[in-house]
């Protein structure tokens, strides 16, 4: 009887509990307040409707700033979403988000194409000479509007330049030793005159060149400087710059420069220049291109969207997704290392836990995405045809992105640059960049399963993945291939530079890279179970390094293999070192100079036999059954699909 009473009581209690839950739920799903934006909208409407009502008295907003103002009036506790209807939106100034917008989501409506432009359409073209067309632009002559990007029918147009191809050689010298970055840079600080002048050959600079229009790119070793001209001293053959270069002309023994944005450099269809003296933009149409029908865009702002917090008041939990961003400009000044001085088309300052997803950013003059502070996520974005860097994001999660054709204005640009602490950079595809694919400094990063190719196309002393002062960083499962060494300080697949310590480079593959592993002023690192393949001579370098563990790696070269600095390899065993030419050389090095060189011979520690590779072209490495790899404990690399999972379109 007692048991029945207990059971009955429990049933009553359960019924009462379920009744309370249905009547008063413990958690309530609060629906987000949505404000819609449409090209057919009206900023006087509420924005609560995606389309205008039948009486045309309410409907979506017409502009993003008006929609943002409406959302800021919503109670803080309610989730907020700005929904963009299909179309092209031209922003006169950046959309600025601050901590009052925390929790906001900005997204395109499902299955709708949305583009946000940081510029304006250019019309009113008239013939300017036999082949060119021009149109006047208000503010250019007065110095109020300046830009280095022109987009015609979606094409990032080439600027007028001299020489037509290649580079001029200048006569400036700067014979001062570089002491390394951590050593303080130049042994003697460059003077202001050295940073603002270049001595030219008289035949290279036309007599009728207009200094106000001209821009000069001065090449250094791992970067370059694009600056304007203030005047030309014909008597002494000196170009005087309007702002200083990052390094003096002639530094590192590099003596190359190019002049841009002058009428004399208009040598082929598709080129353009901004005539500041006359206040007009001049363009040479492609064959069959009708400027009366073409869409021509010029940038007016440096950023389209900016998330701006403060050190003690962060922007948090903002989501940007499913739309496109295009057309931004940059100021006329040197970009610095990695062209890092420029703003992002989307820029985050003091932002935390924000998400950028499924965005497409293209045809912008500066960076694609730039994060200055805070840990955020950038995933499944496509970033391409960019004047400077693709992504600059320290201490962030950056995964499954496609980044290509960057550095179109600034060849010192890096496709994906990071730093700080605890970055995850994985499953990105990166190609066609003038300098490094990925650079990363700082601590405790994971750089994994990235597919990188055709980078390092113009500058030197970088790599597919370049780590500067990296601590406890892991490079694992990456596939780097088809890098051409263009001279200078070279191009490498995996590069550990100054003060990189306790890093691990493992299970990576490089194919068609002459220097798969370059190490400089780095200590206590491990290079393990990688496969390096090259059709030609292969070199691995360890200048001014110490205490390296080099084990279970497979090297396959049709030419000779050279270890420059083999004396720093404290553990050197269980490797396969196969030179089809039969030459494997070990050089001992002091500082940067070899002190001895001798052939390495087979021993019980390493094999010099053919590794019998069955597969390696697609990022995955499989050995034939007769390979010596299994006896040495070398693991097959199972990177079936390095690069994006579900890649962006």
Image: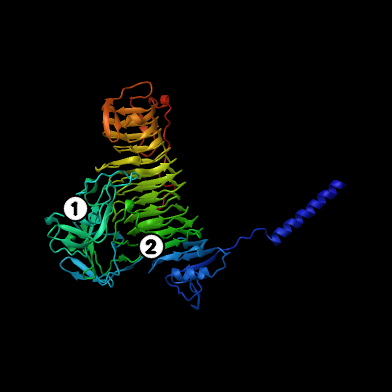
Q: Disc number at residue 165? A: 1
Which residue lies under the disc numbered 2? 303
Dot 2 falls on a residue whose secondary structure is loop
For label 2, the crowd category at 10 Å Cα-Cα, with few meaning under 14, some 14 to 19 and many 20 or more, is many
| Residue 270 position within the rendered picture, expressed as x and y whole percent measured from the top left | 23, 60
Q: In the displayed image of the protein, which residue is found farthest to the front?
A: 188
| Residue 162 position within the rendered picture, expressed as x and y whole percent measured from the top left | 18, 57
Frontmost residue, 253 versus 169 = 253
Residue at (38%, 25%) from the top-left corner?
628
**Residue at mark 2 to residue at mark 1: CA–CA distance:** 31 Å
Figure check: 470 above or below 330: above
Which quadrant of the view contains residue 20?
bottom right
For label 1, the crowd category at 10 Å Cα-Cα, with few meaning under 14, some 14 to 19 and many 20 or more, is few
How many numbered badges does the structure rendering display?
2
Q: Is residue 405 visible?
A: no
Residue at (21%, 53%) from the top-left corner?
257
Frontmost residue, 35 versus 368 = 368
| Residue 368 position within the rendered picture, expressed as x and y whole percent measured from the top left | 37, 56
Frontmost residue, 447 versus 541 = 541
Q: Disc number at residue 331? A: none
First-in-chain label (2 vs 1): 1
Q: Nearer the viewer, mark 2 or mark 1?
A: 2
Whether residue 176 sits left or right of residue 446 in the image: it is left
The answer to the question of whether label 2 and label 1 lie on touching residues, with beta carbons closer than 8 A, is: no
Frontmost residue, 640 versus 261 = 261
Dot 1 falls on a residue whose secondary structure is loop
The colouring scheme, among rainbow, by chain, secondary structure or one colour, is rainbow
| Residue 307 position within the rendered picture, expressed as x and y whole percent measured from the top left | 45, 61
Whether residue 233 sits left or right of residue 518 in the image: it is left
Figure check: 175 above or below 120: above
Q: Is residue 414 visible?
A: yes
Q: In the displayed image of the protein, which residue is found farthest to the right?
A: 1
């Amino acid at each position: 009887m007692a048991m029945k009473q207990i059971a009955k009581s429990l049933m009553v209690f359960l019924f009462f509990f379920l009744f309370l839950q249905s009547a008063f739920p413990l958690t309530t799903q609060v629906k987000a307040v949505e404000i819609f934006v449409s090209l057919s909208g009206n900023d006087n409407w509420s924005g609560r409707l995606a389309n205008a009502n039948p009486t045309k008295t309410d409907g979506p907003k017409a502009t993003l700033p008006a929609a943002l103002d409406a959302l800021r009036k919503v109670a803080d506790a309610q989730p907020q979403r700005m929904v963009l209807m299909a179309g092209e939106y031209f922003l006169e100034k950046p959309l600025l988000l601050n901590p009052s917008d925390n929790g906001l989501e900005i997204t395109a409506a499902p299955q709708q194409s949305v583009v946000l432009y940081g510029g304006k359409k250019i019309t009113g073209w008239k013939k300017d000479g036999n082949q060119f067309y021009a149109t006047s632009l208000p503010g250019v002559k007065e110095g109020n509007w300046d830009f280095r990007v022109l987009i015609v029918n979606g094409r990032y147009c080439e600027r007028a330049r001299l020489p037509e191809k290649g580079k001029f050689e200048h006569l400036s010298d700067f014979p001062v030793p570089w002491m390394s970055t951590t050593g303080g840079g130049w042994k003697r600080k460059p003077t202001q005159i050295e940073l603002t002048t270049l001595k030219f050959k008289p035949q290279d600079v036309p007599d009728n060149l207009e200094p106000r229009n001209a821009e000069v790119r001065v090449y250094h070793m791992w970067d370059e400087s694009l600056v304007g001209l203030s005047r030309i001293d014909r008597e002494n053959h000196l170009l005087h710059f309007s702002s200083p270069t990052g390094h003096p002309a002639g530094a590192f023994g590099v003596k190359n420069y190019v002049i841009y944005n002058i009428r004399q450099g208009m040598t082929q269809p598709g080129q353009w220049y901004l005539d500041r003296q006359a206040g007009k933009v001049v363009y040479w149409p492609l064959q069959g291109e009708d400027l009366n029908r073409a869409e021509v865009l010029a940038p007016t702002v440096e950023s389209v969207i900016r998330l701006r917090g403060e050190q003690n008041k962060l922007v948090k939990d903002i989501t940007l997704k499913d739309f496109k961003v295009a057309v931004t400009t940059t100021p006329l000044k040197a970009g610095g290392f990695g062209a890092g001085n420029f703003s992002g088309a989307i820029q985050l300052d003091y932002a935390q836990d924000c998400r950028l997803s499924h965005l497409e950013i293209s045809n912008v003059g500066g960076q694609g995405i730039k994060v200055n502070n805070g840990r955020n996520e950038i995933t499944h974005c496509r970033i391409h045809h960019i004047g400077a860097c693709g992504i600059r994001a320290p201490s962030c999660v950056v995964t499954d992105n496609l980044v290509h054709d960057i550095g179109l204005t600034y060849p010192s640009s890096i496709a994906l640059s990071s730093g700080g602490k605890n970055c995850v950079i994985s499953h990105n595809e990166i190609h066609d960049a003038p300098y490094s694919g990925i650079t990363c400094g700082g601590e405790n990063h994971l750089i994994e399963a990235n597919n990188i190719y055709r980078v390092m196309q113009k500058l030197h002393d970088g790599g597919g993945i370049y780590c500067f002062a990296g601590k406890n960083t892991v490079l694992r499962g990456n596939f780097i291939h088809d890098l051409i060494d263009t001279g200078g300080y070279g191009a490498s697949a995996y590069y550990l530079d100054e003060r990189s310590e306790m890093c691990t480079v493992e299970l990576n593959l490089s194919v068609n890279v002459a220097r798969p592993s370059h190490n400089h002023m780095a200590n206590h690192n491990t290079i393990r179970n990688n496969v390096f393949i090259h059709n030609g001579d292969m070199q691995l370098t360890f200048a001014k390094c110490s205490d390296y563990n080099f084990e279970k790696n497979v090297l396959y070269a049709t030419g000779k293999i050279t270890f420059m600095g083999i004396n720093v390899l404290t553990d050197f065993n269980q490797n396969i070192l196969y030179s089809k030419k039969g030459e494997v050389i070990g050089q001992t090095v002091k500082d940067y100079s070899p002190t001895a060189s001798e052939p390495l011979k087979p021993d019980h520690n390493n094999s010099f036999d053919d590794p019998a590779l069955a597969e390696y072209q697609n990022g995955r490495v499989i050995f034939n059954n007769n390979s010596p790899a299994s006896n040495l404990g070398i693991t097959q690399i199972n990177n079936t699909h390095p690069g994006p999972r579900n890649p962006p379109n």
